[in-house]
Image: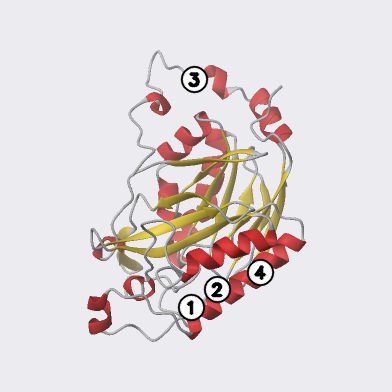
Amino acid sequence: MTHLLKKPLKLALVQLATGSFPPPSPAHRRSNTSVIGSDKAANLARARNRVLEASKAGASLIVLPECFNSPYGCQYFPHYAETLLPSPPTQEQSPSYHALSALAAEASTYLLGGSIPEYVPSTKKYHNTSLLFSPKGDLLATHRKLHLFDIDIPGKITFRESDVLSPGNKVTLVDIPPYGKIALAICYDIRFPELATIAARKGCFLLLYPGAFNLTTGALHWELQARARAVDNQVYVGLCSPARDMEASYHAWGHSMIVDPNAKMMGEAGEGEEVVYAELDGKSIAETRKGIPIYEQRRFDVYPDISEGKISFDE
């Protein structure tokens, strides 16, 4: 039997703590320039230390959280935004791109740079963008957050990413030899199961979601969404959160986790900075699907196969 995951893989999720500058001034926001200073540099240095730690522990695929180089918040996105296009950007345009590329090569591992705020000069738009690098430091894929976090839970939290950010326009699936195919998405994207279904039916063994759920949505749905996407599609799921910082303006949930194809928890972080590991293998996917054979039981004579519909794989 040919497994979706062709070779065992050790996955590491880095639940990283990040610092910030003081909130940017209106004049700086209008300038659309990227500021490189002590805290962004410190965030990149902290990420490097944790990625090298995970690499030494044997991880072949290492994931950083959403907005790993900056705090999470609409007031910070323009302040920390970097220009990625045309690719490759210069060091000045995107220090995070070059730091990730060099780090992936140094660690000789696949490295998913959770996400960074991106600015596109030609459109004057901002995006929340994830970057995947190969063990040689080559850029393999980018994913711009498709579904923007616009919510209003009375008495709890109101947040509107769309006040600053624009959405991406594609599904992101990427092959990582010699293991197989994975899917990239960001945070709020997990609430839209169509993405996961498409990815699984297109042969992905792992769905990765760098995400910064908060204390309200995290308590309600973080674990539920991870396990639901896993059991619906009988694949591995990884959610990578920033560490919780109660002195920050936005309080991330933490609890980065890895879930197996049977929706069992393989590893979960607490609230602080730490690295979560799990050993993934193709046999677990095959056994789960053999025991509960939903892939052979779907009724596409009754309802459509969304993975065969009109899907955008390019921006």
The answer to which quarter of the image holds residue 227 is: top right
Residue 19 visible, this angle:
no
Q: Quick check: 30 above or below 166?
A: below
Pointers 3 and 4 in contact (CB under 8 A)?
no
Q: Which of marks 1 and 3 is in front?
A: 1
Q: Earlier in the sequence, mark 1 or mark 4?
A: 1
Which residue is disc 4 drawn over? 50
Q: Distance between the residues labelled 1 and 4?
A: 16 Å
In percent of the image, x 54 and y 49: which residue is there?
A: 208
State which quarter of the image contains the C terminus: top left
Q: What element carries label 2?
A: helix
Question: In the visual, does 151 lie left or right of 187?
Answer: left
Q: What element carries label 1?
A: helix
Q: Distance between the residues labelled 3 and 4?
A: 42 Å
Residue 168 visible, this angle:
yes
Q: How far apart are marks 3 and 2 (CA)?
A: 45 Å
Q: Where is residue 35 in the image (x, y as percent from the top left)?
A: 39, 79
Q: Is mark 4 on a helix, strand or loop?
A: helix
Residue in the foreground of this view, choosing between 236 and 313 = 313
In percent of the image, x 45 and y 73: which residue is there?
A: 70
Pointers 1 and 2 in contact (CB under 8 A)?
yes
Question: In the visual, does 271 lie left or right of 300?
Answer: right
Q: What residue type is labelled 4?
A: Arg
Q: Which of marks 3 and 2 is in front?
A: 2
The answer to which quarter of the image holds residue 192 is: top left
Which residue is disc 3 drawn over? 298
Q: Nearer the viewer, mark 3 or mark 4?
A: 4
Which residue is disc 1 drawn over? 40
Residue in the foreground of this view, choosing between 226 and 170 = 170
Q: Where is residue 312 in the image (x, y as percent from the top left)?
A: 35, 36
Q: Earlier in the sequence, mark 4 or mark 2?
A: 2
Residue count near mark 1 (Cα–Cα under 10 Å), binned few <14, some 14–19, many ≥20: many
